[in-house]
Image (cartoon, grey):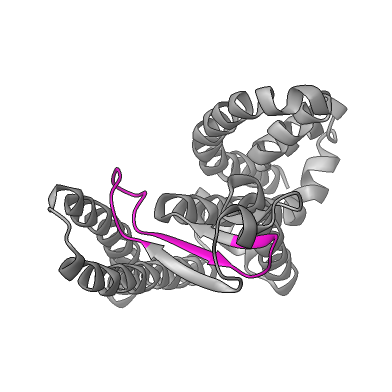
């Protein structure tokens, strides 16, 4: 028992260490904007920016490893808590496959709508931005915490990447939560269906909850091409608002589904 508790605490330590490291990275790098830049510092800042992303990826790896081990221990232990029900329900090959597919597909979709992946068929990068295609460079300075350093990559004349640390963090975080919710909902669908099914309104609400970027896309369908430019700024703010609301909802929804499963099991 003590060995199991120690392992669980170690798993949480990996998760906590990863998030704390990311916060420290964002805060420390933001202090560069207070430094007087010179040509001599540009090369050093480039190396610092590369180091920033190396440490950021290590932090992601620490969080992912901690979550995986914590999920595994909860699933194997088979306790009665809600987190254990979530872990046990999704600890199977089908749920893992659904999670991976959802994580990748939604991550790509969210990356495209959030501007992480840039696709501009009407713009020729080499002409409009005076850049070499293909090429990549790093913007090292200066902005608010989480927005620097930026990595700009031009793959073709119309496809590129604009990696902003806070956007990258949001994409990974929300894609994970959406993947978890989808795999859990798929595993528990039969239980929910037996208890009354899903109404059309419930299904639509579920889509907007699981896919905050779908809301702006849904609204954009009703806006003609003449109004889309003026509507873009509004959609950006709406998407930020939906994402802010969605994160706590995505955290609570698995607990609600687990409660349903627990209630159903108790009745049986």
In the image, the segment drawn in magenta is: 139-160
Q: In the image, is residue 235 above or below residue 213?
A: above
User: Which quadrant of the rendered structure holds the N terminus?
Assistant: bottom left
Residue 143 falls within the magenta-colored stretch: yes
Residue 191 falls within the magenta-colored stretch: no
| Residue 31 in sight | yes
The chief SS type of the magenta part is: loop
Horizontal and vertical percent position of residue 20: 26, 57
Q: Residue at x 55, y 59 (%)?
A: 130
Q: Nearer the viewer, residue 209 or 264?
A: 209
Left or right of 106 in this view: 143: left
Q: Residue at x 70, y 60 (%)?
A: 158
Q: Nearer the viewer, residue 219 or 180?
A: 219
Q: Residue at x 78, y 42 (%)?
A: 192
**Tally of numbered tags:** 0
For residue 51, which quarter of the picture?
Answer: bottom left
Left or right of 165 in this view: 130: right
Left or right of 30 in this view: 209: right
Q: Residue at x 37, y 49 (%)?
A: 147
Q: Nearer the viewer, residue 118 or 156?
A: 156
Q: In the image, is residue 143 above or below residue 196?
A: below
């Amino acid at each position: 028992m003590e060995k199991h508790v120690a392992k669980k605490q170690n798993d949480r330590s990996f998760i906590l260490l990863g998030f704390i490291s990311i916060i420290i990275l964002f805060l420390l790098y933001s202090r560069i904007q207070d430094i007087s830049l010179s040509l001599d510092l540009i090369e050093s800042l480039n190396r610092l920016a590369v180091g920033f992303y190396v440490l950021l990826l290590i932090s992601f790896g620490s969080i992912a490893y901690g979550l995986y081990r914590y999920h595994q221990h909860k699933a194997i232990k088979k306790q009665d808590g809600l987190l254990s029900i979530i872990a046990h329900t999704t600890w199977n090959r089908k749920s893992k496959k659904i999670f991976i597919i959802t994580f990748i597909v939604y991550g790509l979709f969210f990356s495209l709508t959030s501007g992480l992946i840039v696709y501009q068929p009407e713009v020729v990068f080499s002409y409009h931005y005076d850049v070499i295609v293909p090429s990549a460079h790093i913007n090292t300075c200066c902005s608010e915490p989480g927005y620097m350093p930026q990595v700009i990559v031009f793959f073709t004349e119309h496809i590129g990447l604009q990696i902003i640390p806070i956007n990258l963090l949001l994409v990974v975080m929300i894609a994970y939560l959406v993947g978890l919710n989808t795999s859990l909902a798929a595993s528990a669908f039969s239980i929910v269906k037996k208890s009354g099914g899903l109404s059309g309104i419930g299904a639509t609400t579920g889509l907007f909850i699981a896919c905050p970027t779908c809301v702006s896309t849904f609204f954009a369908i009703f806006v003609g091409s003449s109004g889309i430019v003026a509507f873009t700024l509004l959609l950006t703010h709406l998407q930020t608002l939906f994402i802010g609301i969605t994160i706590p909802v995505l955290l609570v929804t698995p607990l609600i589904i687990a409660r349903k499963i627990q209630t159903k099991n108790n009745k049986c």
